[in-house]
Image: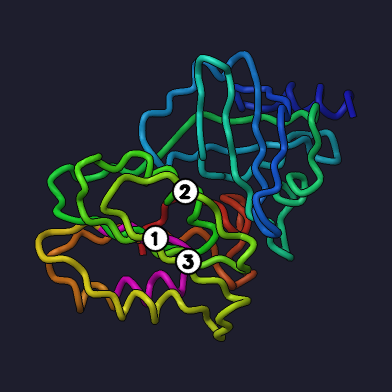
Amino acid sequence: MIELEEAAMAVSPMPHRVVVDEVLQLGPHLRRIVFEGETLASLAVSLPAQWLKVGIPDVSGSGLVQRAYTIRGAYRGWGVVVVDFVLHADAGPVAAWARRAVVGDVAYLGGADGGYQLDPAADWYLLAGDETALPAIASILEFLPEDGRPTCVVIEVPTVDDIQALGYPDGTEVHWLARDREPAPEGRLRETLAGLCLPVGTGQIFLAGEMTLVSAIRQDLAGAVLSARVDAAAYWTREPASRSSSGQTGQPVLQYV
């Protein structure tokens, strides 16, 4: 394993060699890994829903397998970055690595990119998505203004046991949809959002998840909500042919649809 790591370092452009400092199982389909590394003190994280690439040594020793993931938390003073991994049944190589990772395992991280800019002039916010959007939504909640501004959050997860305790300011309503409790062929997210009674005024909407569903919901919102900016991100797709070097199922590269 040491030889593979040395070979990966020789060809890797990724600036941060890190070790797994802590592993937390948040639910049957969600696993948190806390990475520690001296160079992480230089990682620039200033917005919610920023992402970075996580790399693991290729089995051939010729380089790294890389996938993009949302940064759940970054603590520069401690040299720590937190990433929550979604554990799908058809997990790609990095998610499969995360499923079996233990304290002391080595990985590589790229620089922080992207992020979500909250509009301070918005009268209300709506944050919605499936489990792949949960790390981004959770980080956005921590950046919301503390003025009681109406905020609605709708998150669909595989099971009741995947529901998490989240931090958010007064004025926030959080609705959890668990597919094992309310089974539906395509989940309940679209139906639930269609039934929402949104506040008056100009809003800002963050929507992320499976590509086809996000596209359909975005069209629904465009027709029903005239006074809101809709930011829709496709994090994954059910179509296996679309899987590419940009990421695995659940990767959080922002792709507007």
**Between disc 2 and disc 1, whose residue precedes?**
2
Q: Which residue is pictured at 60% across the width and 45% down the height?
A: 84
Category of crowding for the residue at label 2, using alpha-carbon neighbours closer than 10 angstroms: few (below 14), some (14–19), many (at least 20): few
**Between disc 2 and disc 3, whose residue precedes?**
2
Which amino acid, mark 1? Answer: Val
Magenta region: which residues? 205-219
Above/below status of 12 relative to 251: above
* Residue 218 is inside the magenta segment: yes
Q: Which residue is pictured at 71% across the width and 55% down the height?
A: 92
Kindly report the distance in space between the C-alpha atoms of the residues bearing marks 3 and 1. 7 Å
- Under circle 2, the secondary element is loop
User: Quick check: 63 left or right of 227?
Assistant: right
- Under circle 3, the secondary element is strand
Residue for badge 2: 166
Nearer to me, 132 or 90? 132
Q: Main secondary structure of the magenta part?
A: helix
Which amino acid, mark 2? Answer: Leu
Q: Quadrant of residue 215?
A: bottom left
Q: Which residue is pictured at 61% across the width and 30% down the height?
A: 109
Report the colour scheme.
rainbow
| Residue farthest to the front, as pictured | 170
Kindly report the distance in space between the C-alpha atoms of the residues bearing marks 2 and 1. 9 Å
Residue for badge 3: 176
Q: Where residue 239 sits in the image (x, y, percent)?
A: 59, 72
